[in-house]
Amino acid sequence: MRFVQFLLAFSFLSLGVFAQKPLSGPLRTGDILFQNLDCGDLCDAIEKVTKSYGGRQLSHIGLVEIIDDNIYVLEAIGERVQRTRLSKFSSRSNNEILVGRIKKRYNDIIPKAITFVIQKLNVPYDDVFLYDNNKYYCSELLYDAFKAANSDNDFFSLQPMTFKQPGSETYFPVWVDYYKKRNMDIPEGAPGINPGGISLSRKLDVYVYRK
């Protein structure tokens, strides 16, 4: 009984720590923003198979760039890789935004990562989520950016993707329909990366962003 009480207390304490860690000071170039977009069944399916910082539901990610005191987010969304004003990025959802700040010892690679993404502006969005097909989805873009900036060594990590319901061999119906419309097999087990996985990186300090 005492052990159970300890686990419950630890769980609540952990949640409290996550909730009470707001970002101190303004955003910086190179900060990574994490969103829960509430985009329907697709986002729900992504979130259900993804572990994320503090147990949150994260379905989108972007990279902060500050130009003459104007704050932008470099992101792959919609039809292409694009530069978006922070105000527009923030307005997409009422859910909490998390900030992943690269730890100081890695600060020297941030400018290279930013340059990489700028060079990819207008590259088409990767709507089939296949790595290395000359298109980008949101977390794939950041994976490649920081890998390139890190002398072509992994900074974040690719993992086998799954489109199956947790604890089951059954695919989410939304993914079955999604890939059927594209005349493709579901790329189960192919290498990929998602916002939740990046949020757990030990190379980041994670904060809550207050709009």
Image (spheres, grey):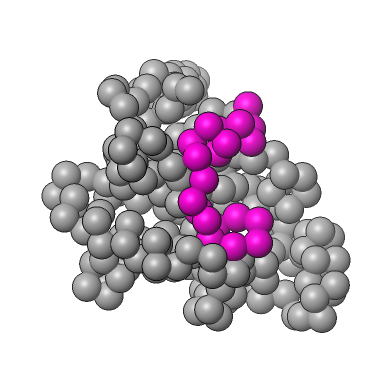
Q: Quadrant of residue 23?
A: top left
Q: Is residue 208 above or below residue 160?
A: above
Span colored in magenta: 75-94
> Residue sitting at 27 percent across and 46 percent down?
102
Total numbered labels: 0
Q: Is residue 89 magenta?
A: yes
Observer-nearest residue: 46 or 105?
Answer: 105
Residue 10 visible in the displayed image: no
Q: Is residue 155 above or below residue 57?
A: below
> Left or right: 201 with respect to 38?
left
> Left or right: 109 with respect to 33?
left
> Residue sitting at 60 percent across and 55 percent down?
77
Which x, y percent locates residue 33? Answer: 44, 41
Observer-nearest residue: 162 or 64?
Answer: 64
> Left or right: 185 with respect to 87?
right
Residue 37 visible in the displayed image: yes
> Residue sitting at 25 percent across and 62 percent down?
112
> Residue sitting at 43 percent across and 42 percent down?
72
Q: Is residue 91 magenta?
A: yes
The residue positioned farthest toward the front in the image shown: 68
Which x, y percent locates residue 140? Answer: 49, 64
